[in-house]
Image: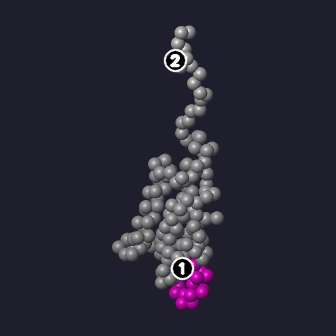
Amino acid sequence: MGYCSVEEVRGMIKSDALNMIIGDEYIEDEAVREAKIIPIIEEAIGDADGEIDGYLVKRYPVPLSSIPKVINKFSKDIAVYNLFSRAGIDEGEKEKNYLNRYKAAVRFLENVAKGIVDIGIIDNIKRANTGFSVNSSSRLFSRDSMKGM
């Protein structure tokens, strides 16, 4: 299970951009075009999720069993970037938006890996190894209880 779905990523791509992503050939038949783009999107999602796991593994067990909304969002952004980067991203054109979203996702994930940002997943086993924690018994003696002794 990926951090986002094929349908979510496909919904972010305009139909006129599909031929550019698929490759050099122009496919006029919409059904054939959709059939060819699905495995490409699946691969882009797999690559995106692998990249996300590479950052998250420093703080969380991966793959995540419950997917926070922010990870879903960044998985989609990275997958779309992966799709458009197949043909090259033109930084002076509308595709720069995909690059900017990718860079924002990477910055966020770097901050998660550094511990600056928390994605809200609690894993007691993993966290016990990353911080300092003290548990002790309640106090037996105090100044008041020791008076006159």
Q: Residues within 10 Å of mark 1 (few under 14, many from 20)?
A: many
On the image, the x and y values in percent for residue 78 come to 50, 66
Q: Residue at x 52, y 76 (%)?
A: 11
Q: Residue furthest bottom?
A: 28
Q: Residue at x 57, y 67 (%)?
A: 4
The image quadrant that residue 140 belongs to is top right
On the image, the x and y values in percent for residue 104 come to 43, 61
Label 1 sits on residue? 22
Tag 2, which secondary structure?
A: loop
From which residue to which does the magenta span run?
A: 20-37
Label 2 sits on residue? 144
Tag 1, which secondary structure?
A: helix
Quadrant where the image shows the N terminus? bottom right
Q: Residue furthest top?
A: 149
Of helix, strand and loop, which mostly describes the magenta segment?
Answer: helix
Tell me which amino acid carries mark 2. Asp
Q: Residues within 10 Å of mark 2 (few under 14, many from 20)?
A: few
28 w.r.t. 56: above or below: below
Name the residue nearer the viewer: 128 or 63.
128
Name the residue nearer the viewer: 6 or 122.
122
61 w.r.t. 128: above or below: below
Q: Residue at x 48, y 69 (%)?
A: 81
Q: Residue at x 44, y 57 (%)?
A: 107
How many numbered circles are shown? 2
Q: Earlier in the sequence, mark 2 or mark 1?
A: 1
Distance of label 2 from label 1 (alpha carbons): 79 Å
